[in-house]
């Protein structure tokens, strides 16, 4: 059982900034996210996309913003449960909550902050009839530990930043990397495209374009893949791992079963402190809805700031909360 003051479901920018604001009030936080790294959409979908509406930054790349947020919260030492989905919320006799993940990890806290962005991101799976048979047996949709691919043959399918970046990264780890893409053109950063093409020219990566994976084979574990090439017909490759990286689809997921008031796939909140209809559970960022709602990172930061004020009163009902500016107290004084 992991015990903390605030369980934050979602490690995107709003969830990460909640750690900072909570830390100023000496509240401990633990974050749960289905993705294997913090940052939410910023890390997984568009890490190299420029963002222009973060105060103090005329322009900042999404990935750099995540790095900055992680550096900002480092003094408060948050905990992370990554690569696991928050599935169940139970109310305990003492008024606290227990959150159980898809892998059975249990977390306990008096306050829950749902900062799940657009919901639980689920991988877009290619239309291969028997793909479910090989999930976790050679087929992975999210790379959690790159070292498991050491000295293995890995086939990556996709043409975006994630597919390109992981192809480049795993080229130094795996025995062989094969990249399959439906077109000759790629959607990712030009610099990454150039690197993959260079690795292909050097024979480090086998790049197969105008193709898609159509079949998987193996007895209990993935052993082969069939690739349908637009001109050459069916190709077969022996592989240890198949990683389709076609992006993520946002779904409300288990959140819909937690007894919260939902309107059009978003959680209704009170704008006084972004509390839900369940006392002790708050919702901030893109996951919530209210009159005048704007789905901006900036708004998520504002909502997190107000939310932790009410969270403090739940966690420490007998203590008086005294608001002080960080320009006066600094950060170290709050630790």
Image (spheres, rainbow, N blue to C red):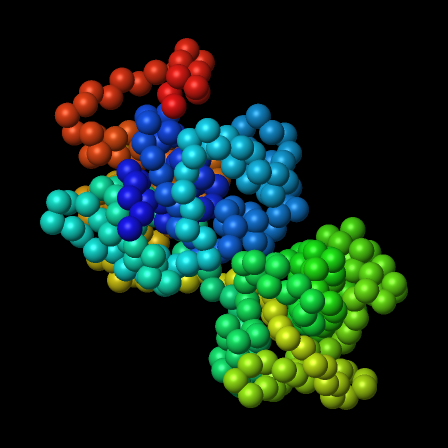
Residue shown at 15% from the left, 45% from the top: 95
User: Is residue 231 placed above or below 59 in the rendered structure?
Assistant: below
- Name the quadrant containing residue 206: bottom right
Q: Position of residue 316 (x, y in %)?
A: 20, 29
Q: Does residue 171 appear in this view?
A: yes
User: Number of callouts in the render?
Assistant: 0
Q: Which of 96 and 115 is in front in this view?
A: 96
Question: Can you name the residue that lies furthest to the left here?
Answer: 93
- Name the quadrant containing residue 6: top left
Question: Can you name the residue that lies furthest to the top here?
Answer: 328
Residue shown at 61% from the left, 86% from the top: 217
> In the rendered view of the protein, which quadrant contains the C terminus?
top left
Q: Which of 264 and 177 is in front in this view?
A: 177
- Name the quadrant containing residue 271: top left
Residue shown at 50% from the left, 72% from the top: 136
Residue shown at 49% from the left, 82% from the top: 133
Q: Where is residue 147 in the image (x, y as percent from the top left)?
A: 61, 59
State left or right for residue 264 relative to residue 63. Answer: left
User: Is residue 285 placed above or below 164 in the rendered structure?
Assistant: above
Question: Can you name the residue that lies furthest to the right here?
Answer: 201
State left or right for residue 155 relative to residue 288. Answer: right
Q: Position of residue 314 (x, y in %)?
A: 20, 34
Q: Does residue 164 appear in this view?
A: no
Q: Position of residue 331 (x, y in %)?
A: 44, 20
State left or right for residue 177 relative to residue 51. Answer: right
């Amino acid at each position: 059982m992991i015990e903390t003051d605030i369980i934050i479901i979602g490690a995107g920018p709003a969830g990460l900034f909640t750690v900072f604001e909570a830390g100023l009030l000496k509240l401990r936080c633990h974050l749960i996210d289905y993705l294997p790294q913090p940052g939410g959409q910023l890390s997984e979908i568009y890490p190299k996309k420029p963002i222009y509406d973060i105060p103090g930054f005329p322009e900042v790349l999404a990935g750099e913003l995540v790095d900055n947020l992680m550096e900002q919260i480092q003094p408060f030492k948050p905990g992370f449960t990554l690569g696991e989905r928050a599935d169940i919320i139970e109310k305990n006799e003492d008024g606290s909550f227990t959150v159980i993940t898809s892998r059975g990890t249990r977390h306990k806290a008096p306050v829950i902050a749902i900062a799940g962005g657009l919901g639980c991101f689920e991988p877009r799976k290619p239309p291969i009839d028997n793909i479910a048979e090989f999930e976790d047996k050679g087929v992975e949709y999210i790379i959690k530990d790159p070292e498991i691919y050491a000295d293995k043959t890995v086939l990556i399918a996709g043409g975006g930043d994630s597919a390109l970046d992981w192809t480049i990264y795993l080229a130094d780890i795996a025995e062989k990397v094969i990249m399959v893409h439906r077109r000759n053109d790629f959607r990712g950063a030009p610099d990454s495209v150039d690197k993959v093409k260079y690795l292909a020219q050097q024979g480090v990566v086998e790049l197969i374009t105008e193709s898609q994976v159509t079949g998987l084979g193996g007895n209990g574990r993935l052993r082969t893949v069939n690739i349908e090439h637009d001109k050459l017909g069916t190709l077969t490759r022996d592989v240890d791992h198949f990683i389709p990286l076609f992006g993520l689809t946002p779904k409300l997921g288990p959140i819909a079963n937690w007894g919260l008031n939902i309107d059009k796939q978003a959680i209704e909140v009170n704008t006084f402190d972004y509390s839900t209809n369940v006392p002790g559970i708050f919702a901030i960022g893109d996951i919530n809805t209210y009159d005048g709602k704007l789905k901006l990172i900036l708004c998520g930061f504002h909502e997190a700031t107000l939310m932790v004020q009410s969270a403090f009163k739940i966690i420490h009902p007998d203590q008086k909360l005294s608001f002080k500016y960080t320009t006066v107290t600094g950060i170290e004084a709050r630790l």
